Amino acid sequence: MPKGEGKTLAQNRKASHDYTIEETIEAGIELKGTEIKSIRRGSANLRDSYARVYKGEMYVYNMHIAPYEEGNRFNHDPLRTRKLLLKRKQIDKLFGETREQGYALVPLKLYIKNGYCKMLLGLAKGKKDYDKRHALKAKEAKREMDRALKGKY
């Protein structure tokens, strides 16, 4: 199965608006007990989350996973830092690329692939306000063109 394919459980739609995604990487995510049950219910939120290399390991910050309702005392902190599972070469490559000005690692998608929870990370460069406006205008023009073509047939 290609990367990014599988049952999508959470998606960061704001990322494509705020950033230009230059490259994507698939990473496993280390979860505890009730977190995977909560994710399978669709209780994960990737908004405002980001990934960073810390002491040679890759972590995702500010990813919210709601507590599992039936988990009672076994639940974990919803905003805890979670480790991402990548190979050493991938971590070193991403660390070097994010050291450049304006680049960040942004979680794009959380999905189940072959029974495992995976995260699609994007190497992103921040957009300026005028870039965002330009992208919105292009999107609106494409929508108008599609509407016009649809009306003719």
Image (cartoon, grey):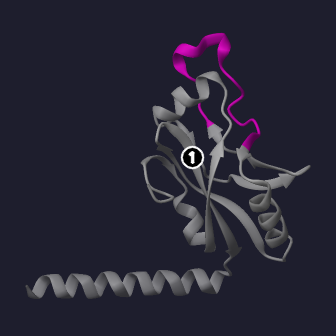
> Is residue 124 covered in magenta?
no
The residue drawn where x is 59% and y is 64% is 15
x and y percentages locating residue 79 in the rendered image = 71, 37
The residue drawn where x is 48% and y is 36% is 115
Furthest-right residue in view? 55
> Is residue 80 covered in magenta?
yes
Q: Quadrant of the C terminus?
A: bottom left
Compared to residue 33, the image places residue 130 above or below, namely below
x and y percentages locating residue 134 in the rendered image = 53, 87
Where is mark 1, residue-wise? 118
Horizontal side of residue 111 vs 149, given as left or right = right
Compared to residue 24, the image places residue 64 above or below, namely above
The crowding category of the residue bearing disc 1, from other C-alpha atoms within 10 Å (few below 14, some 14 to 19, many at least 20), is many
Q: Amino acid at mark 1?
A: Lys
x and y percentages locating residue 72 in the rendered image = 61, 12
Looking at the image, how many numbered discs can be counted on the residues?
1
The segment highlighted magenta reads: 65-83
The residue drawn where x is 77% and y is 39% is 81
